[in-house]
Amino acid sequence: MLEHAGFPRLAEASRPLPVTHGEIADFARDPYACMQALRREHGEIAALQEGEQRVYFVFGPEYNRQILTDTQRFHSRFFAIRGPKNSSQRRLTCGLLSMNGEQHKQHRRLVQEPFQKRAIVGYHDSVLGVSEELTRSWVPGTTVDINEEMTRYMLRLTSLIVFGLDCRDLAIRIGELTETWVALNHKVGTTALVSDPSMAEDYERLLEVAVELETAVKEMIAMRRSGRVGFDVLSLLLRAHDVDTTVTDDQLVGHIVLMFGAAHLTSAHSLTWTLFLLSQHPEIMQELHAELETKLQVAPPRPEHLDELTVLDRVLKESMRILPASSFLHRMTAEPVELGPFSLPAGAVVIFSQLMTHHMPELFPEPDRFLPKRWQSIAPSPYAYLPFGGGARMCIGAALGTMQLKISLTRILQQFKLSIPDQAAVNARVMSTMLFPLGRIPMRVERQDGQFSASEVRGNIHRFVTLPDQAARTSKKAA
Ligand code: HEM
């Protein structure tokens, strides 16, 4: 979410600068089109200016590296709406993404326990259990909205991984409240930028939901403290926290809510996009099916299998390259900074984008094509390929998220063949930093039989991906 208030006044420019004059709201309306136009016109660095306000944009690995590694000058200000002092909203937005400098370093160290390799193995059976619930609910021969299904599925899975299987009802209630709270943060953040009259009402609702959410999370913490300790992110955090009490209870609530918010939709969208891309590339689906059959047959994967599924690994990497769930990020300058031809004052907003970087032809030839095989021969730098961000605040849940995605895809595709009805519309939209599947994405669910063919889809997805020609769409399993 963008920090909207207080765009800085301009420093005097002594030479022509790569600046486009327009409406800053253009960016909120269609971030991808706006960034593409700026890059086409100006190259690797540009600014969008409206009156005295400027937002800065950088494109490509070198600037990504500079912004992500210079944490002293480029601060994270993730939440647009911090709420009044001493409010639940203020406390809920005090998680890692609102911390900088030493405080961020210290807290990141203190909350890393649930994301270590040995902890991640411990969540394996929970992920399998929730994925079995999903596949049991699907009836062969029916059509589901895969966007809705993956969003609900990840809501359940994230609730249980973060808050615990044994307090299921409260965990799911917290999950639902967090979902509403995250959506309201996005909505109020965006409407503030385009001055929508409904903003005041949404803001009041946001503050109310924040109170409910904080109360529910505190109830869960109290239950865990009174002895009901499980194997989940919160329990592991509390165990570490009870040894080292540097993190206050309010900060703990902020961290845990941020973790949930950061995990839910990013994972759901990554699953939806991967299943969509596979449904449009029968020959790649065929290869993945063969791998799952050879290495696992119909058995659920064990932790040690995940590293052996190399086709799955390439499919996921390529899906997160071409349709990255986190599509752009932003930072705010903490002090005056020289950036390319610009002298930025303190408080300037700088935007950099995974979606733009991942579609640069000089980094990824034929960037709009879904070509998982490319990963057999490339090893891009961490600032050229960054679906989980990079530098000191690279996603703390990257390994956990990857494990969840791999198990979920494996269990779905071992049991079901998914296809999109011919001429269905598939739309995507970049909204407040994420690449959302927009609206319904229908998928026909059938028992897995290893026979794959693709359909032709409509919609704006063609802006992001070049889908294969009709001629190359059908692949029958060798008899
Ligand atoms: C496919 C899934 C995921 C994607 C694409 C993703 C993406 C990202 C990205 C791009 C960032 C960097 C934000 C920035 O630099 O401003 C980030 C940070 C973060 N993510 Fe994830 N994430 C995913 C899953 C998860 C999971 C499963 C968790 C935890 C349960 C998680 C927790 C966090 C946290 C706490 C941060 C802030 C780290 C910090 O500021 O030090 N994420 N994530």
Image: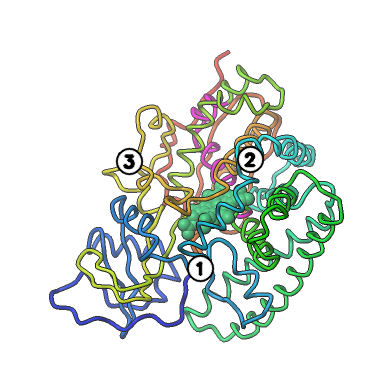
Q: At which x and y percent is residue 425?
A: 54, 53
Mark 1, residue position: 1
In the image, the residue with mark 2 has its CB under 8 Å from the nearest atom of ligand 1:
yes
Mark 3, residue position: 364
Magenta residues, start to end: 264-288
Q: Residues within 10 Å of mark 3 (few under 14, many from 20)?
A: some
In this rendering, is residue 32 above or below 52?
A: above
How far apart marks 3 and 1 lie (CA) works out to: 28 Å
Residue at the far left in the pictured view: 15
How far apart marks 3 and 2 lie (CA) works out to: 26 Å
Q: Amino acid at mark 3?
A: Phe
Q: Amino acid at mark 2?
A: Gln
Q: Secondary structure at mark 3?
A: loop
Res 388 seen here? yes
Sequence order check: which comes first, mark 3 or mark 1? 1
Q: Secondary structure at mark 2?
A: helix
Which callout, 3 or 2, points to the residue nearer the camera? Answer: 2
Residue shown at 27%/77% (left/top)?
21
Residue shown at 61%/55% (left/top)?
265
Mark 2, residue position: 404
